[in-house]
Amino acid sequence: MTIEEALVRVQCAYPKIYLACHARHQNSKTTGVQLSQRDSTVLAHLDESVAFGQGELARHLGVAKSTFSETVDGLVERGFVSRLKSGRSIGLLRTVRGTAAMSGSSVLESARLRRLLRRLDEAGLARVVAGLELLADGEAR
């Protein structure tokens, strides 16, 4: 398969995944954990075990550091994110509680995605997750 063939196949698959797993837009009023779209986006970019630089994530998301800091303050106060200070930089980790909140507010609705994933055998499930994570991590860090 060429890069161009792969490009078209990914571009065709992504909207199908989105449509298959998305029925309604999530916002702070429709999620039980009161997450804004920005909150959900921040949580989706974080990990539970590998810290992501606060300044780096603000730049990546195109948000002013002061605005981003306010968002992170709210997430820390609710127990969704923890800060790790390392020298002059601050690293962010998503907590277990933050993972649950993010999953409950994702545009890929858990119940719909779960139904699709259950159709796969163990090997297929591993390939899907590995492929998506490989693609997602290509430029993320």
Image (spheres, helix red, strand yellow):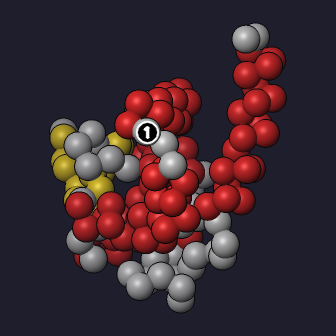
In the rendered structure, the answer to whether residue 22 lies left or right of residue 133 reads right
Residue in view at x 76 percent, y 11 percent: 2
Circle 1 residues within 10 Å: few <14, some 14–19, many ≥20: few
* Residue drawn at 49 percent across, 68 percent down: 111
What's the amino acid at mark 1? Asp
Residue 37, horizontal then vertical, whole percent? 56, 70
- In the rendered picture of this protein, how many numbered marks are placed on residues? 1
Residue 51 visible in the picture: yes
Q: Is residue 6 left or right of residue 78?
A: right
In the rendered view, does 21 fall on the left or right side of 101?
A: right
Residue at image point 41% right, 30% down: 123
List x then y, in percent, for residue 47: 32, 47
Q: Nearer the viewer, residue 3 or 93?
A: 3
Which residue is disc 1 drawn over? Answer: 121
Q: Quadrant of the N terminus?
A: top right
Residue 136 image offset from top left, x and y in percent: 53, 36
In the rendered view, tell whether residue 90 sits above or below residue 74.
Answer: above
Q: Residue at x 60, y 51 (%)?
A: 62
The answer to whether residue 15 is above or below residue 139 is below
In the displayed structure, does residue 91 sit left or right of residue 86? right
In the image, residue 36 sits, relative to residue 115, either above or below, namely below
Q: Quadrant of the C terminus?
A: top left
127 or 37: nearer the eye? 127
